[in-house]
Image (tube, coloured by chain):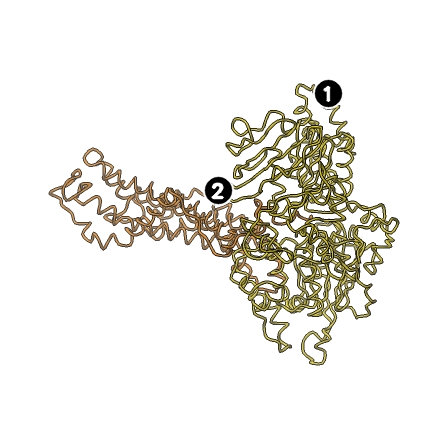
Chain colours: A yellow, B orange
Amino acid sequence: MTAAAPKPAPSRPLLAVRALRLETASVPPRPLVHGLDLDVQPGESVGIVGESGSGKSLTARAVAALLPGTVRAFGSVVADGREIIDSRSGRPGGLYGRAPEGHRGRTVSLLMQDPFTMLHPLRTCGRQIADGIRAGAPGTSRRGAALAVTERLAEVGLAPGTADRYPHELSGGMRQRAALAAALAPGPRLLIADEPTTAVDAHHQGEVLALIRRLQQARGMGLLLITHDLRVAFSACDRLYVMYAGTMLESGPARDIETHPAHPYTAALLAAEPSVRERYETLPATRPAAGPAAPATGCPFAARCAWAEADCRTAEPVPHPVGDSTGPGGRLTACRRMPAVAADVAAATRRTVAVTVSERTARPLLQVRGARKSYGGHEVLHGVDLEVPEGGAVGLVGESGSGKSTLARLVTGLEQLDGGRIVIAPDAAREDTGGRDTEPLLLAPGRPARGSRLALASAVQIVFQDPYSSLNPVHTVGSALREAAASPAARRRGDSTTTPVPTAEELLESVGLPAAYAARRPAALSGGERQRVAIARALAVRPRLLVCDESVSALDVSVQAQILTLLARLRQELGLSLLLVTHDLAVARQATDQLYVMHRGRIVERGRTDRVLDHPEAPYTRQLLAALPGSPALPGDSGTSRRTEG
Amino acid sequence: MTVPAEPAADRGPAVPVRPAGAAGRRRLPRPGLLGGVCLAVVAVLFAAAALGGLVFPHWARQDLLLGVSGPGAGHPLGTDDLGRDILQTAVVGTRSALVGPTLIAVGSMALGNLLGLWAGYRGGWADALVGRWADLVLSLPALLVTVVVVGVLGGGYPAAVLVLAVLSSPTDTRLVRSAVLAQRHLPYVEAAEALGLSRRRILFGHIWPNVLPQALANALVNFSFALVALSSLSFLGIGVPPGAADWGRMLSENQTLMYDNPAATLLPALLVVTAATAVNLLGDRAQDALDLRARTR
């Protein structure tokens, strides 16, 4: 692989990774990263993009000499002219596995995902930044350090007073700024930012990213940005490496990769990325990873690739130049079929913009009127109105703390109203039968009677955000689904209809999972599979409204596309209505017809999704759109919309 | 309000593509050398408790002419002052050494888990009530209270077991309560609530299995505490009637024989320490194993 690596530019690269191999220290070792080559030139911004399990975070840790003790490293990592991997011990070089003096701090510095865990909760921000300053320049006087702290804070746009505050006193965005100031305090030549915006509110993502980019350019510092989000990578990086299952699949200038992906995986990732500007007929998702982990030989993506041939499964992928681009910064792809299938891949991942949805005149299934809710004397919902039409898909967007999840929980009966009311329309399909649910269900403040609770449960079900905790770890998938199908809510729903209780196997099939999964426990499932099971569990009740509370936001883009496609199919097949609660405007654009924008417990804008996102009226909606990574000031006023095929 | 998390699978160590194929099947981790030894010790002790009386039906046969004697033919570890065989007495005494602690551990676990589940899930006044009860009981010196209750009111061994079961339940209660609080608002519990499942079903079918590893580990700790406590009571002459085979009683009756036959006191002392240690270590490992079972990929 080394032979195919781009020759370093005349100037010595700031970071040169050669044939980096990471594996677990277990017996037998499990490979985590296979022979990676990577360069960062001084002042260059380089991104590693990959989904969960791609090995991108471990690569970053290897560079920072912060590998956990359970991982062994081989190959070479030269940072600022010094080797930091000891190939014999498989540990960071030097005695006792320590990184060279000054490696962390003066050479590289790490900015982590979660600013709350990165900063020490019991020390003021100022002291933590001062620590970094002393690490960079030992012997700095107390007074000098204090001055430098003020400077660093100003650099990230924080007031000098922030130095005396503790991390918990800062908002999420400010905390990440403070963490950035601490990471930059020693004056590193290379900043490694591991998912720096993922834990930050959508509202602040754009500005944090822009800040990192600006400081990187101002300081002439190298940046190695680790992210799962293509939008983030494109907006902040000059050059990208695309990783999958521990293998580098493609590298090259960000612009080129964005417009002409040279690997089927990258093309699929781009196609799965929802856009805030257009709605597509479907997001062409790759087939889900099936079967056991990546094979030991051949291209790791072969199992999911539509263009894989027999050779792809046996021959090791070797990066080779794309077209005539050579030299540093050139395009490399690890797809052995690439020049040949490029046109096919491009055609297959082309997306067609959906025809504008017709105005729905369906009667409302769910009506929320003047909903109020307080926690501990603090009102989080100030009289919210919301409607979900029968069979409709409604999005509810807003930043965290806006009250959107509270509203979702009220509608699901997990919380009780403090004011206002919620009405569920009678079930039209049963009005003739004269049975249950022919009267509208009214929820008023206070704890409803068990009958009303069950009526609500049989009409509305919820799918949560975190696929890892939404299934009971000790129950098998089958028993969870059978329990749901036999639950009081499902029985109540089943009383007046003649349809038989669905079996676990039928439910699994309806969400595109093999029936054999019934015998598995959640721990044996991937995140996307768990979310499918959670959806199947909700469907077991045959609800009329499915509430998805950030249900796709913890998933990888390709998995997210699969789940969105699944939800669209279920809506069509079952006539299900959807209330999609999300912070992600692009997801809302793809999956909803109507949109409500929520801010501080109030609905600030509502309307057809395309109209709200194309022609926002509320200042807050404009702010949200402007905060998207890589977005121009406002959509509509520039023609830079990405990937406008079809 | 939830902050959008990173892509979920990034939490663990990087796993190529997805969890491996051995998926779903439960794999209990190997107990390791120490765990294996503990397991063997506990198995032997329980076998002795079950079969000791059958193997040595004549353990209580006295030989007053022989009296105390050191290890020798016919009596591998010698005899006590009544000429009873030390080894046989100790083996038969395993039953009273283990039955009491087992009852205490199970009883305290039942009481503590019920109260803890109720307090943790119900919250509010129930939580306050149970919390104060636990504080009150914890503030009592368990051994002293047992000595007083059994000594003054009588009732012997069964009474001692009952009192100790109640007195050791607060640790279970507190542990289970806090474990329930941690589970209480997890989405899987809320999903169960959204399905309209009964409170009993949610508590015992969903939450309790996830709390069980900790509860079980704590029960084993209680077991070793009870073992020592009951032996101490026997040593003080409370609980087990005179003449019965019991480690604590052997200790107190034979302490004067230290110079004639040291094994008569050292064996029961060693057995108490070994049994308590083995069960304690096993508790640690049981928790790890049970925890892993649910989280094994």
Q: Left or right of B64: which side holds A160? A: right
**Count of numbered circles on the image:** 2
Residue under the image location 72 percent in, 47 percent down: A230
Relative to A492, residue A548 above or below: above
Q: Is the Cβ of the residue at disc 1 closer than 8 Å to that at disc 2?
A: no
Viewer-nearest residue: B229 or A470: A470
Q: Quadrant of residue B64?
A: top left
What amino acid is labelled 1 in the image?
Gly
Viewer-nearest residue: A246 or A219: A246
Residue A328 in the image: state x and y as whole percent: 71, 36
Q: Is disc 2 on the same chain as disc 1?
A: yes
What residue would you read off at disc 1? Answer: A144
**Along the polypeptide, which appears first: circle 1 or circle 2?**
2
Relative to A106, residue A253 above or below: below
Give the chain letter at badge 1: A
Q: Indicate the secondary structure of the residue bearing disc 2.
A: loop
Q: Left or right of A173: which side holds A636? A: right
Q: Left or right of B133: which side holds A150? A: right
Q: Nearer the viewer, mark 1 or mark 2?
A: 2
Query: Real-space Cα distance between discs 1 and 2?
Result: 48 Å
What amino acid is labelled 2 in the image?
Ser
Give the chain letter at badge 2: A
Viewer-nearest residue: A569 or A613: A569
Residue A569 in the image: state x and y as whole percent: 69, 65
Residue A531 in the image: state x and y as whole percent: 63, 57
* Residue A200 visible in rendering: yes
Callout 1: 10 Å neighbours few (<14), some, many (20+)? Answer: few
What residue would you read off at disc 2? Answer: A26
Q: Quadrant of residue A411?
A: bottom right
Residue B207 in the image: state x and y as whole percent: 54, 56
Q: Quadrant of the N terminus of chain A?
A: top right
Relative to A285, residue A496 above or below: below
